[in-house]
Image (cartoon, coloured by chain):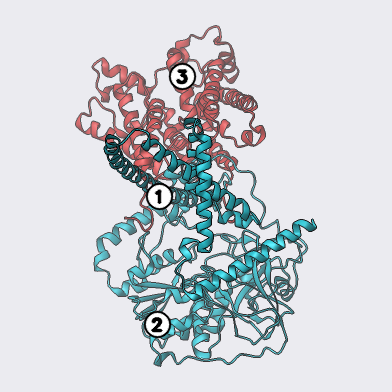
């Protein structure tokens, strides 16, 4: 039935789409394919207002709280820092700063467990609050009278990232030149995942500030219009937002049907505007930008008061005594949040960060006293009991029922993707547009065979990325090799040419002279080579102080060639061997003497500046010291 | 660990299969009413054979037996095959057909989810080719038969192929309307006069159309329960009606009307229960339309021009072969792609 309706809608859209006025665009909803409607479970955590959590005894701030480069730590252990002071600054284009959420002392900068699906430890700054909560000097920005370029640049120091869960640094989404070409700002307030209600409560309680933040974002982007998309299961939030933006022309609240994953940026843009952002383009390419509702609030706090991003609203829900939303400082231990929610119920087995559709298990070490900090990405923590979040029964074979395809919001064919991913047919799986998959989990949600489809897609994606990288490396290696072969070939040719020339010259000499002279000349050359090789060998064996120095004197092609000539020589020139060796020794001695007179300086250090010479001397001194050290250690051992 | 989503809302395969079985119940009741209780014997025989064969093959293939027996897919295959066979077919016909369907067409291809052909139709086709005489000998509906058999007499006949002393085989069998129509047309009779025969009812076969109607009822239940998608039955029935209508309008004297084709033979069983087998069918919405329409056209052509009175089994198997191609050519447009 749905399909018929969709089909007629499509027909109508196609026929009348061109005549659609903007007015229609502002009231119509443009449905996407599929989607699911799981039980919402949002009421539990929306009965109480947002409560500010007390400053905990310890704050653990992971450096990795955003997408992009790790920020550069600017403090040391023992430093006293003020609230809002920068602890680590953005490094590279895509990165975000980290600030002290309160005043206190840096107790450690070390690896600790962070909330990440891998469960692996990562670098964290540990801050022991002094309880005074003293702000550093805050510098509000007069954003109306500051060049946009400076405003965007200043955002690098704000630490603001997308607070919907994507944690993409916000300044990257605003073009540094202030010319974005964006005409419409979309505010993502859909909050489509079950259980999560932090945006809902934020809109209910702080709609005024959000709207001011939207005005700033609109100004920065140069976007004339702003559409705020809210799912229809949040009527209080929608009406509070509608009231708050009543005086703002070009700002509009649009209520969309509750259907997961309407909060996915591309799906939301389609729902609100009917615009299908091409798969290979960004929203800004079609004049749109999408911000989460909490992110624009952070923008407002930053520009209006100079407050960097140091806290967020977190939904603490699931099997806790009083599910509720809290304003939590980044780095706050999960335990403080749990305690504030009245503690967990006895049936809880683990914690999930994010919603039940796309969230992940927090590392469970030490359960129930899980030591995990709240980060910028933590929109929701669910205390999970097996009753609600049971492990899925064993997977059955796919029966190709295509329920997954009906549910896929990207109109992919999950059953085909599964088939190809399972058989490691990565070419096919790519042809079937695996990389358009947003991993929303709708396919698994409706699968009668309980197949963990999303896991198969994650696996295939990571494999393909790894294969692509390997392919790229192989291509580079092949190019290098092709170049080397060409070079070797060229050198061979050149050598042959030289040989030919020399042979011609030699022939001329032979014609003039007796036969004996030429071979001796050749043999002398060989002898010289042997002598050189021996000298080098001697030098190498004399230098084998430490293993690192061994690598300084690798077997150069010259020595290898000399060795080869030596063996060659042994076979071909046996009769004159003694004489040759004697001659060679003579020559080597002469060379050595000459070298000694010249001061043993390698040729490439002959003409160096005083500074470089000083460096060389320094290094030589260190080397000598090292040699002595190894010598003493050898004797002592 | 990232094993999201943590929640699901999907019927299990067992639930789906049980609902399909439930949807067949009205048809079975109608069957018993029209043809007598003999069909219950066939259904039981087929069920037991299917489960035993499935268990044995799972054991040989070293697969877990319990979850795959509990998925009930073997029972669905068994019931569909039993309902497609002539109701008083000898016991060994039922067993051979079911065995072939489960062992060869399903398990040897890899079991549930891996069979490229509809197992019940493979079983049916094998029987039809191997034992054409038995497979085309349909009993007359009880109210038309000269000697309506009691349940015990039917049971006796199924198990030993022996009729009560005074009854002749002709007294209990009759040609099906599809068969009768075909033979009469070759004798230069016209459709209008042929359908005056007592075996014809309001739309199609007297009695048989009641069973067909009951299948339609069960099919609507499956649609309402979202066990099957509308594409397959709608496209099948529409295409069958369209092609029958076209021929009928061109030459009504030699081609039966579309309603006759819709209500005859295995049309309804095919539309809602046979082509809706997800494993051997296409998965894309457009693919389903093409597949079902293809089955309908082939069914019609085999009925009218082929050597068999009904063409559902061969039509389904032929279209099963095209499924990979159909799927590949009917991929829907992905969001954000041209």
Q: Which residue is mark 3?
A: B126
* Percent coordinates x, y for residue A90 in the rendering: 52, 76
| Tag shown at residue A220 | 2
Residue nearest the observer in this picture, B119 or B235: B119
Residue nearest the observer in this picture, A504 or A88: A504
Find numbered disc 2 in the image and state the secondary structure of the residue it sits on. helix
Chain A colour in the picture: cyan
Q: Chain of mark 3?
A: B
Q: Nearer the viewer, mark 3 or mark 2?
A: 2
Q: Chain of mark 2?
A: A
What crowding class fits label 1: few (fewer than 14 Cα within 10 Å), some (14-19), or many (20 or more)? few
Give left or right: position of A39 versus A569. Answer: right
Q: CA distance from mark 3 to mark 2?
A: 73 Å
Find numbered disc 1 in the image and state the secondary structure of the residue it sits on. helix
Q: Which residue is mark 1?
A: A480
What crowding class fits label 3: few (fewer than 14 Cα within 10 Å), some (14-19), or many (20 or more)? some
**Does label 3 lie on the same chain as label 1?**
no
Q: Chain of mark 1?
A: A
- Vertical arrangement, residue B238 with respect to residue B62, above or below: below
Residue nearest the observer in this picture, A403 or A534: A534
Instruction: Point out the tag, 2 or 1, that comes first from the N-terminus.
Output: 2
* Percent coordinates x, y for residue B88 in the rendering: 52, 18
Query: Most extreme residue toward the left, as rendered?
Result: B250
At 47% across and 10% down in the image, what residue appears?
B169
Q: CA distance from mark 2 to mark 1?
A: 47 Å
Residue nearest the observer in this picture, A4 or A36: A36
Q: Which chain is displayed in red in the rendered image?
A: B
Q: Nearer the viewer, mark 1 or mark 3?
A: 1
At 53% across and 7% down in the image, what residue appears?
B166
Q: Nearer the viewer, mark 2 or mark 1?
A: 1
What crowding class fits label 2: few (fewer than 14 Cα within 10 Å), some (14-19), or many (20 or more)? many
- Vertical arrangement, residue A572 with respect to residue A8, above or below: above
């Amino acid at each position: 039935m749905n399909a018929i309706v969709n089909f007629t809608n499509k027909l109508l859209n196609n026929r009348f789409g061109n005549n659609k006025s903007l007015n229609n665009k502002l009231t119509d909803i443009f449905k996407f394919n599929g989607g699911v409607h799981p039980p919402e479970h949002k009421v539990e955590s929306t009965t109480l207002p947002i409560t500010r959590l007390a400053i905990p005894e310890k704050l653990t701030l992971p450096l990795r709280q955003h997408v992009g480069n790790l920020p550069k730590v600017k403090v040391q252990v023992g430093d006293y820092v003020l609230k809002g002071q920068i602890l680590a600054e953005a490094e590279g284009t895509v990165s975000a700063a980290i600030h002290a959420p309160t005043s206190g002392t840096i107790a450690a900068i070390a690896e600790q467990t962070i909330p990440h699906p891998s469960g692996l430890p990562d670098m964290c700054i540990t801050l022991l609050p002094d309880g005074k909560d003293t702000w550093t000097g805050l510098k509000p920005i007069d954003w109306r009278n500051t060049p946009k370029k400076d405003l965007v640049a200043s955002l690098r120091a704000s630490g603001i990232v997308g607070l919907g869960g994507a944690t993409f640094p916000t300044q990257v989404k605003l073009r540094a030149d202030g010319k974005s070409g964006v005409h419409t700002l979309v505010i993502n307030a859909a909050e489509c995942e079950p259980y999560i209600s932090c945006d809902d409560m934020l809109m209910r309680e702080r709609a005024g500030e959000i709207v001011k933040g939207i005005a700033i974002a609109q100004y920065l982007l140069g976007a004339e219009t702003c559409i705020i998309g809210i799912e229809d299961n949040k009527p209080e939030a929608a009406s509070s937002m509608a009231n708050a933006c009543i005086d703002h022309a070009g700002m509009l609240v649009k209520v969309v049907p509750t259907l997961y994953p309407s909060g996915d940026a591309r799906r939301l843009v389609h729902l609100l505007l009917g615009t299908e952002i091409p798969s290979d383009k960004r929203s800004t390419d079609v004049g749109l930008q999408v911000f989460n509702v909490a992110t624009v609030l952070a923008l407002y706090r930053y520009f209006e008061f100079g407050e960097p991003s140091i806290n967020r609203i977190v939904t603490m829900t699931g099997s806790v005594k009083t599910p509720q939303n809290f304003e939590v400082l980044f780095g706050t231990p999960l335990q403080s949040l749990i305690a504030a929610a009245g503690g967990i119920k006895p049936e809880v087995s683990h914690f999930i960060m994010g919603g039940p559709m796309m969230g992940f298990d927090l590392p469970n070490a030490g359960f129930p006293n899980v030591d995990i900090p709240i980060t910028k990405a933590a929109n929701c923590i669910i205390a999970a009991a097996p009753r609600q979040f049971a492990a899925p029964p064993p997977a059955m074979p796919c029966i190709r029922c295509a329920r997954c395809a009906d549910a896929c919001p990207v109109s992919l064919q999950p059953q085909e993707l599964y088939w190809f991913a399972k058989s490691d047919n990565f070419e096919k799986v790519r042809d079937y547009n695996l990389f358009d998959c947003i991993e929303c989990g709708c396919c698994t949600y409706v699968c009668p065979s309980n197949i963990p489809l999303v896991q198969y897609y994650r696996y295939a994606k990571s494999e393909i990325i790894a294969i692509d990288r390997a392919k790229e490396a192989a291509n580079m290696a092949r190019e290098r090799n092709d170049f080397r072969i060409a070079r070797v070939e060229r050198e061979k040719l050149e050598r042959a040419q030289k040989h030919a020339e020399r042979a011609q010259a030699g022939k001329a000499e032979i014609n003039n002279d007796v036969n004996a002279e030429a071979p001796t000349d050749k043999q002398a050359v060989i002898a010289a080579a042997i002598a050189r090789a021996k000298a080098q060998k001697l030098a190498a064996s004399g230098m084998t102080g430490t293993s690192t120095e061994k690598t300084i004197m690798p077997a150069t092609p010259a020595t290898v060639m000399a060795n080869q000539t030596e063996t060659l020589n042994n076979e071909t020139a046996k009769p004159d061997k003694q004489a040759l060796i004697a001659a060679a020794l003579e020559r080597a001695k002469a060379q050595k003497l000459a070298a000694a007179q010249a001061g043993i300086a390698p040729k490439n250090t002959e003409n160096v500046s005083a500074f470089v010479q000083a460096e060389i001397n320094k290094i030589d001194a260190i080397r000598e010291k090292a040699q002595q050290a190894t010598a003493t250690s050898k004797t002592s051992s | 660990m990232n094993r999201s989503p943590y929640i699901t809302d999907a019927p299990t395969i067992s639930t789906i299969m049980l609902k399909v079985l439930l949807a067949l119940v009205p048809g079975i009741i109608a069957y018993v009413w029209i043809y007598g209780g003999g069909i219950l014997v066939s259904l039981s025989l087929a069920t037991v054979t299917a489960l035993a064969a499935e268990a044995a093959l799972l054991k040989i293939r070293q697969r877990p037996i319990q979850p795959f027996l509990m998925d009930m897919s073997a029972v669905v295959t068994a019931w569909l095959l039993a309902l497609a066979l002539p109701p008083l077919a000898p016991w060994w016909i039922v067993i051979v057909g079911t065995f072939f369907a489960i062992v060869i067409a399903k398990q040897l291809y890899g079991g549930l989810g891996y069979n490229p052909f509809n197992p019940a139709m493979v079983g049916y086709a094998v029987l039809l080719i191997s034992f054409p005489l038995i497979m085309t000998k349909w009993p007359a509906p009880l109210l038309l038969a000269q000697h309506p058999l009691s349940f015990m007499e039917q049971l006796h006949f199924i198990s030993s192929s022996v009729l009560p002393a005074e009854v002749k085989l002709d007294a209990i069998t009759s040609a099906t309307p599809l068969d009768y129509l075909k033979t009469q047309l070759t004798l230069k009779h016209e459709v209008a006069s042929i359908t005056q025969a007592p075996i014809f009812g309001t739309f199609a076969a007297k009695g048989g159309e009641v069973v067909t109607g009951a299948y339609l009822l069960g099919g609507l239940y499956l649609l309402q329960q979202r066990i099957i998608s509308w594409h397959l039955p709608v496209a099948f029935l529409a295409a069958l009606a369209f092609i029958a209508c076209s021929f009928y309008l061109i030459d009504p004297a030699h081609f039966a009307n579309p309603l006759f084709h819709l209500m005859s033979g295995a049309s309804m069983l095919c539309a809602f229960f046979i082509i809706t087998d997800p494993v051997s069918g296409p998965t894309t919405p457009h693919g389903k339309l093409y597949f079902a329409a293809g089955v309908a056209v082939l069914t019609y052509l085999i009925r009218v021009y082929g050597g068999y009175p009904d063409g559902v089994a061969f039509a389904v198997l032929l279209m099963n072969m095209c499924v990979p191609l159909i799927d590949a050519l009917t991929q829907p447009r992905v969001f954000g792609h041209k």
